[in-house]
Amino acid sequence: MYKDLSSQGYKNFYTFRTSGIVDTTREQILRYILYLFSEDRIILNTYLTKKLTQRFNLSRYQVYRLVRQLEKHGAIRKNVISKKLYEIELVDPRVLVDLILCGCARNHRTPHPAEHEPTRQELLRHARQLLKPRYQRQNTYHKKATEKYSLKPTLSEDEQLELSADFELWLMDINSKILLFEDFYGELQALPYKTRFNSKAKAFEILKNAEEIFRIAKSQYSEAVFLTPTLPPIFPQRLALWILSYLLHRIKAYLRKKNKRTVPHFRVDEPQSSFNPHSHIIIFNVNWIMEKEQFTEYLEKHLMEFLKNLGHHYKKTINNRATEYDVLALNELGQVFIKKYNKYKKQKKKYSGPINWLTRITLEGNDYVFENPPPDNAKRSKKTAHDGGKASVFDYIKYYVMSNLIKAKQIEEDQKIKVDNPALVWYWLNRRPFYYASPKIRPSKEKKPPSGWIFIGSFYITENSFLLELLN
C-alpha cells in the first residue's frame, strides 16, 4: 500500500517555503526533479543545484533543505563523495509521485511593491512583466520562445525562422515522451504525448467540429455579418489579443441591446505576415451592424477606453486577483500605447481604423456567401472549394483550419518535423485554438463521467528509466 497522503509527514514537507520565488509552486519543483530523474536515476548535487537555480531561482540553501526533506521521506539517498560533493540517488519514485499529487497549484500573486511611491519606470517595468504569459506547466522550448517573443508586436523573417526552429525542437521533444497518470485505483498509466500539432486524429476532429458548427448555424440563421478587426503593429502579441477580444465583446453587447436577442459568433484568430494578429469574425442572427466609417469611430472609442483603463479591465476580465499595484502599472502602460496609437495614425495616412473588412453574409441554397468578398477570398477559397462553384464563407474560413490540419497530418505520417507554416507556429506560441464558437452553435456532446485519472507529468522513456519499474 502507498503512504497516506494526508499524513503529518507530508503536511510537514509542504511547509517548506521557497521564499522570494514568484509564480512558482513546490509542486512544479517536484515535477521538475522527477523529470530530471527520468533521464538518469543518479545525479550530482551540483547538477541539481544548477538546474533548480536556473529554472526556479532557488538559493543553494533552499536546494540543500529540499534535498534533506526528500531524503527524510525516503524518496532519495545521498552517496557522499567528498565534503561538498555527493550523488543523489532516486530510491522510491512513488514517494515523489505522491508528494506531487498532494500538492496544490496556487494562483499567481504579485509580490507587494516597495513602500515608496513607485516611479513611472518601475510601473512600466512591472506592467510589461504582467504581459508575459505565466503558465503553470510549460515545456522548456515553449518557455524560451514566449520569453523572447511574447512582448514583440511583430517578428522579422529571421525571428520567425528562429521561432519555427524552437517549435520543431518542441515537436521532437514531445514525440519522445509519454504522459503519466494515476488512475482511480492508484495504478500508473502511460499515454503517448499527442496534441493538435502532431496528431492527425485530433486535427480531423477539429475540422469536423467546425463543419458541424456551420451546419447548426445554417439551420438556425439565414443572415450574418463578416468582419475583420485589424490593429496596427504596435501592440505586444498578448495585448493585441486582449484588445481584439474586448472589441468583439463590445460589438456583441451593442447588437444584443439593439436587436433584443442573442448573437452567436464564430471567430478565427490568425497572424499576418509580420506575426501581428487579427481576427476573422462571423456574427450570426444580424443583417448589419453599422456603416464602416461609423463603425470605425465606434471601435476606436472603445479601443481608447480599454487602453485608458487597461489595469481595471485586466482585473475585471483577465485576473481578478490582480493587486492595486498591478492595476496602477497597467493603466500607466495603457497611456503609453494611447500615445503610440495616435502617433501611428499621424504617420500612416492610409490607416483607416481598427476594422479592415465589413460585409453582409446571406444564405443561398445551403451555403453562406459574401455580399462583398474579402480581397483574398478568391485566392484562399480556391484551395478549399470542393465543387468548383461559387466559394462559400465556410470555404474561406476552412482555409485556416485546413492548412494547420495538413501539417499535423504530415508530421504524424511522415515523422518529418520540418515546419513551413508560420501560422501553426503562431498558434503554438500564443496557445490559441484554431477557432472559437459561441456555445449556442456548438454541437452538443455527451458529458462523459470523470475518468478519475490524475496527471503526474510528461517524461522520457529509456531502458534504465524508473518509469518502466513503476509501470510494470
Image (cartoon, grey):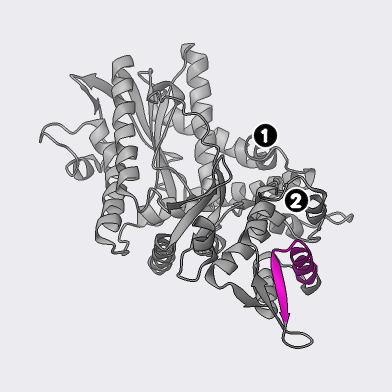
Q: Can residue 374 be seen in this view?
A: no
Q: Label 2: how many residues lie within 10 Å, few (<14), some (14-19) or many (20+)? A: some
- Look at 71% across and 72% down and name the residue there: 77
Q: In this view, does 165 lie above or below 457?
A: below
Q: Residue lying furthest right in this view?
A: 115
Observer-nearest residue: 27 or 210? 27
The CA distance from mark 1 to mark 2 is 16 Å
Picture mark count: 2
Left or right for 224, reference 32: left
Q: Is residue 45 above or below residue 185?
A: below
Ranked by sequence position, the earlier of labels 1 and 2 is 2
Identify residue for label 2.
Answer: 110
Between disc 1 and disc 2, the foreground one is 2
Q: In this view, does 182 lie above or below 390?
A: below
Identify residue for label 1.
Answer: 316
Q: SS class of the residue under badge 1?
A: helix
Amino acid type, mark 1: Lys
Q: Where is residue 61 in the image (x, y as percent from the top left)?
A: 81, 72
Report the magenta residues as a range: 62-79
- Look at 38% across and 67% down and name the residue there: 161
Q: Residue lying furthest front in this view?
A: 1
Observer-nearest residue: 89 or 46? 89
Q: Where is residue 49 in the image (x, y as percent from the top left)?
A: 70, 74
Left or right for 470, reference 157: right
- Magenta span contains residue 63: yes
Observer-nearest residue: 154 or 20? 20
- Look at 29% across and 62% down and name the residue there: 415
- Look at 49% across and 48% down and name the residue there: 345
Amino acid type, mark 2: Thr
Q: Is residue 78 visible?
A: yes
Q: In this view, does 364 lie above or below 32?
A: above
